[in-house]
Image (cartoon, rainbow, N blue to C red):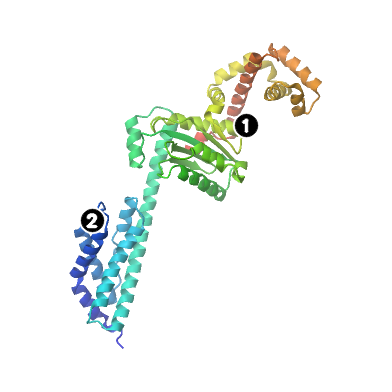
Amino acid sequence: MRTSAALPAVASRLKAASTHIANEFVRQYVSAADPGSPDRQAPVETFETGVRIVGLCAEALTGERAPADAGTERGARVALQGKSVAEAVDWLRSLERVITDHVLADPGIERDEVRAALAGIAELFDELCTRELESFTNTYGELSSWHSRVGTDLLSCLVAGPPMDASTVNNHARVLNINPHQPFRAVAACHEPVPSPQQWARVRRRFLEVLGRHDPRREALIRDRNGLLLALVPTNREGPGIVELLTRMLDDELGRSLFVSSGEPAESLAAAGHSCRQALSALEIGIYRGQRGQVTRCTDVILEVLLAHNRWVSRRIIDTRIGPLVEKPHLLDTLRVYISCDMALQRTAEELVVHPNTVAYRLRQIATLTGRDMRRITDIGDLGVALMAYDAVQMRRDQEEGRTDLRARLFG
């Protein structure tokens, strides 16, 4: 029986046939490649790489190890092209098959030599594939990090407020392979209480699955921190809209801890900053109101959003309409419940767990202090707006005293 000591002769024969093997590989691989692929346009590079790897096989059969830089760097290349790592591995395995076919077809090699040679070649290609996987992973990680930074910078600028030049936005979008000339809508989510990193990873995955179903082309811009997420999502997609999909998502246990909001659609990415700010403002109001498990649309709380961002107007409305009630919380609560119960005295009493006569007495006090008729729709509407202004001021005060601003949490 021949042993591996005879492999140098096999290696010499293999190296002598390197040009033939590389030509055969080019003929098979390039003809099988897609017409528009880079490999079809670069047979010379494919040939030279094939010759080099055949030489590495010959060296491996003589006991030499492949050098540290023996990889083809195809892993990095396919990562940059946005393709699967399988393309780099399949390329190497195709070359391995051509080389092993040549060894099997050589009549001058004994069976035991063939077994030993194929084992050595397989070991070398396993090592080469491992290096291509590492090359792909490293490049993909760097590329993902770079894309994330570009996307975050773009989203941060859009949220900031000052108008961005459309050409600047469009250039950034093209770098991210996003079509900027389509409508976008912002959606935001907040998990309360603040989750652990593991909990947030699960919630974030669910959220991204919904975005993926709505936007299979993956053109959304996303920014998240533990417990908080903002996304700009294209709206011109077939099937259910993103708000409908998020509403469905909240039907299970996730709805008990997640606040979700949406802004109005914008006609293009450059104009989507308004939608981002609307979604974050609506989310703040949803959190303040305790509206878990539902999507708070900006249009549903548009008056509160306006009041929350104009403190002078809010305070003037409070002072001129319900100023005398501010120091009387029980009257404010009675007014709030009375309005929510459609001015039904009995229902208001049941909600407050008091006697109807107590409600009637409090309403007379409110009427006296505010000068409003508690039976007139216009006066009640006016007082309702004043309560919204009061809530907006309180919400801002609570944020300043105990909760970081949502924008600061996302981009700080």
Q: Tell me the distance, in whole angstroms, between the alpha carbons under discs 2 and 1.
A: 61 Å
Give the answer, above or below, for where 297 lies relative to 38: above
Mark 1 lies on residue: 289
Q: Tell me the mark number nearer the camera, choosing from 2 and 1.
A: 2
Q: Earlier in the sequence, mark 2 or mark 1?
A: 2
Residue drawn at (34%, 64%), measured in percent from left and top?
129
Give the answer, above or below, for where 101 lies relative to 397: below
Q: Position of residue 209 (x, y in %)?
A: 49, 47
Query: Label 1 is placed on what type of residue?
Result: Arg
Q: In which quarter of the image is residue 104?
A: bottom left
Whether residue 193 is visible, yes or no, is: no
Tell me the crowding category of disc 1: few under 14, some 14 to 19, or many 20 or more residues within 10 angstroms, Cα based: few
Mark 2 lies on residue: 40
Q: Position of residue 52 (x, y in %)?
A: 23, 66
Q: In which quarter of the image is residue 61?
A: bottom left
Query: Label 2 is placed on what type of residue?
Result: Arg
Residue that extends furthest to the front in the rendered view of this protein = 239
Give the answer, above or below, for where 219 lies relative to 389: below
User: Where the N terminus falls, by quadrant?
Assistant: bottom left
Q: In this view, does 152 lie to the left or right of 4?
A: right
